Amino acid sequence: MTASLPDMMPVLSRGKHRNAKRGACFMEMASYLAGEKWSDHPACTHGLLAAVARDVNDYVEDGARSRIVPLIPSVVGLTTDDPRADAWIAQEVALIALPIAPAPRQRVAAVGLVRCEEVLNDLEGRPTEAMRPEIRAALDAQPHARDWAYRFLRRGRSTSARSFNRRSAPVIARASVAGVAEALGEERDERLVGLLERVVVLCEERFPQAAMASSVVSAASPAERQRTRA
């Protein structure tokens, strides 16, 4: 059984809401489904995934926000302690942003791709300069952003995965989501919805135990789950 949306629920809107009577954002509804205290920072979802969801929620137009509602149950229980998770998420968002973002955001995305790869190399025991073909191809397709990123990174950077997860990964993810939102074209909302879909799927693939836990979340009402937790 999977977590399910209630028959009656607030219409999603931008920003933070004190309670459901004032509206709800994507992550506030996730906290409700999880039986947690009303919050846009619930414990049931990995912190960076939740940050990406909040940003997408706030960037999409009101008429398109209903398209992310079906994803809400998917993020309930979707979390992990794996130290690679922040790099996985930030890199996925940067990959989406790099080809389409305006130049300043594109540079951040390029720096992010390189830094995520370095962090993953360190955590997985590969040489620091190693780079997977798909990451190299994405950078080579945007040579100006790639070259700027390498010049920027010559100034030095922290080698601590903990520092990266706390400081750098959120900056990379937020700038990349903003870059997708600022990209020219009529497909803005479609790209943002697609971005969140891709990140959720990535987390489901990379957090297998968490995804399994999420898939068996009781279909009981949030009120019943609150009583169980109590």
Image (tube, grey):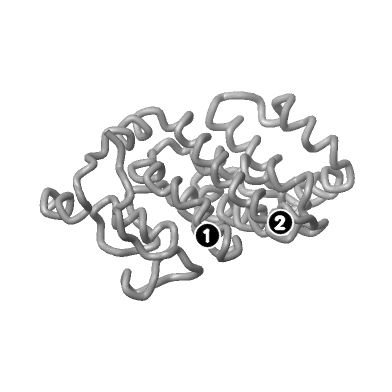
Q: Is residue 126 above or below residue 158?
A: above
Q: Which image quadrant: the N terminus?
A: top left
- Mark 2 or mark 1, which is nearer to you? 1
List x then y, in percent, for residue 156.
72, 49
Q: Which residue is mark 1?
A: 57
> Which corner quadrant of the image does residue 128 belong to?
top right
- Residue sitting at x 45%, y 33%: 204
- Residue sitting at x 59%, y 45%: 90
List x then y, in percent, for residue 87.
56, 41
Q: Is residue 170 left or right of residue 183?
A: left
- Residue sitting at x 77%, y 35%: 138
List x then y, in percent, for residue 22.
36, 75
Residue 199, disc: none
The numbered mark, 2 or 1, whose residue comes first in the sequence reads: 1
List x then y, in percent, for residue 175.
66, 57
Q: Is residue 212 above or below residue 172?
A: above
For label 2, count other residues whose C-alpha is less than 10 Å away and answer few (under 14), some (14-19) or many (20+): many
Residue type, numbered disc 2: Gly
Q: Is residue 85 left or right of residue 42?
A: right
Q: Which image quadrant: the C terminus?
A: bottom left
Q: Nearer the viewer, residue 28 or 221?
A: 221
Are circles 2 and 1 on residues that touch, CB within 8 Å? Answer: no
Q: Is residue 44 left or right of residue 104?
A: left
Q: In what element is the residue under mark 2? A: helix
- Residue sitting at x 66%, y 59%: 178
Residue type, numbered disc 1: Asn
Q: Which residue is mark 2?
A: 179
Q: Nearer the viewer, residue 224 or 154?
A: 224
Q: In what element is the residue under mark 1? A: helix
